[in-house]
Image (spheres, rainbow, N blue to C red):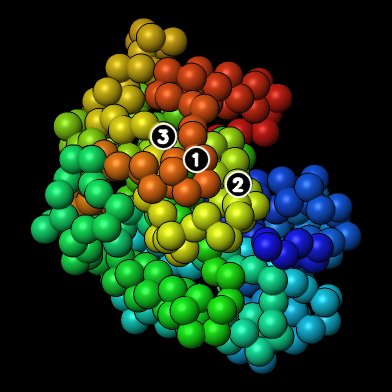
Amino acid sequence: MTKETKRVLMTGAAGQIGSELARALRAKYGDANVVVTDLFRPSGDLAEGGPFELVDVTDAKAVDAIIGKYGIDTVYHLAALLSATGEKNPQKAWHVNMSGLYNVLEAARARNLVRVFSPSSIAVFGPTTPREMTPQDTVLGPTTMYGVTKVAGELLCDYYVLKYGLDVRGCRYPGIISHLTLPGGGTTDYAVAIFYDAVKHGRYTCFLREDTRLPMMYMPDCLKCTLDLMDADFARLRHHSNFNVTAMSFSAGELAAEIRKHMPGFEVRYEPDFRQAIADSWPASIDDRAARTEWDWKPDYDVAAMTADMLAALTKRRDDGTLGA
Ligand code: NAD
Ligand code: AKB
């Protein structure tokens, strides 16, 4: 039987996903029962709407102490360095991503926690992986340090399931698109930046080629996916920490064309940089039938619905004066 979550700890909560997932978890479990942590204190209700603590996940004692202090039973471990930042400092990416995960898993094992969520990424795949409808169980072979840490992370999580019976879950998020908190240094960040620049300036310079096609997901689906996976019946799960999930795939040029349906004068220039090689090593589309079969995963947003919603939300923020220069 799946055990119940009562008190949650989130690491890396000030980031793109954590800042929205923390709000969703507070709505679900109550403000006082979701302890939000990061390396820095974010402004506004994220730090003020419930318990907030500064925690560096590479500090094993700090991770264990915060779990003990608040009687935590479930951890959402989101602290990480992403692909582009990771390629600029691979040693730090290894340290943060691997030590952070190990410290969380060890504290969870020692304190017999109910459940841990540790997201993986499409970055686990590499140039030798089938690019179209990438299967659930296939060749991995990433060529970025970020991808290496995500493969090792999946294996480590599965080891804790097998060896210690710890309930660890995770999915391979594709690029996540959102309008509340900017992404923190990934290759799919262009698919967020393009909306900000469209609304603010009517033009965008893209760091990937026009024909670069990648799997993506809108934030409401990312939140649903995460919460549903964590609520799934453990007995139904054949996979644990490495579920393929996706909602849509498009090229940079196709996304620009979708935005032009709302803003006919929108201009995009393409000036690929080092992130092009990373994108070229990742899948164009994902087969997520395992997630659909094992815990009923199904996205709500396609590219048209996501684009309309992103533009409406960012236009409102621009008109409210909360979008910045
Ligand atoms: P993000 O970069 O926006 O946020 C990460 C947070 O971790 C930041 O707030 C940062 O301050 C914090 N952090 C970094 N080092 C830390 C440390 N030593 N101790 C504590 N906190 C630290 O990332 P995100 O997009 O919110 O990603 C969350 C998770 O989801 C990551 O594991 C990432 O790999 C995964 N993921 C994200 C995407 C995406 O498109 N956003 C896609 C696939 C997987
Ligand atoms: C990145 O681009 O690094 C992330 C990811 C897909 O893991 N958005």
Q: What percent of the width, then of the height, locates residue 239?
A: 42, 61
- Residue 91, image quadrant: bottom left
Inter-mark Cα distance, 1 to 3 = 10 Å
Badge 1 element: loop
Please state if 228 lies on the left or on the right of 201 as rendered.
Answer: right
**Residue visible at 56% across and 79% down in the picture:** 165
Identify the mark at residue 247; answer none if there is no mark.
3
Q: Nearer the viewer, residue 270 or 159?
A: 159
Q: Mark 2 = which residue? A: 228
Q: Is residue 33 above or below residue 108?
A: above
Distance in Å between CA atoms under marks 3 and 2: 15 Å
Instruction: Identify which residue, 288 or 18, lies in the foreground.
Output: 288
Give the mark toward the camera: 3 or 2. Answer: 2
> Looking at the picture, how far across and down is residue 280, in whole percent?
17, 49
Distance from disc 2 to disc 1, alpha carbons, whole Å, reads 8 Å
- Tag 1 residue: 297
Residue 279 seen: no
Q: On the rendered image, what quadrant is the C terminus found in?
A: top right
The answer to whether 80 appears left or right of 56 in the picture is left
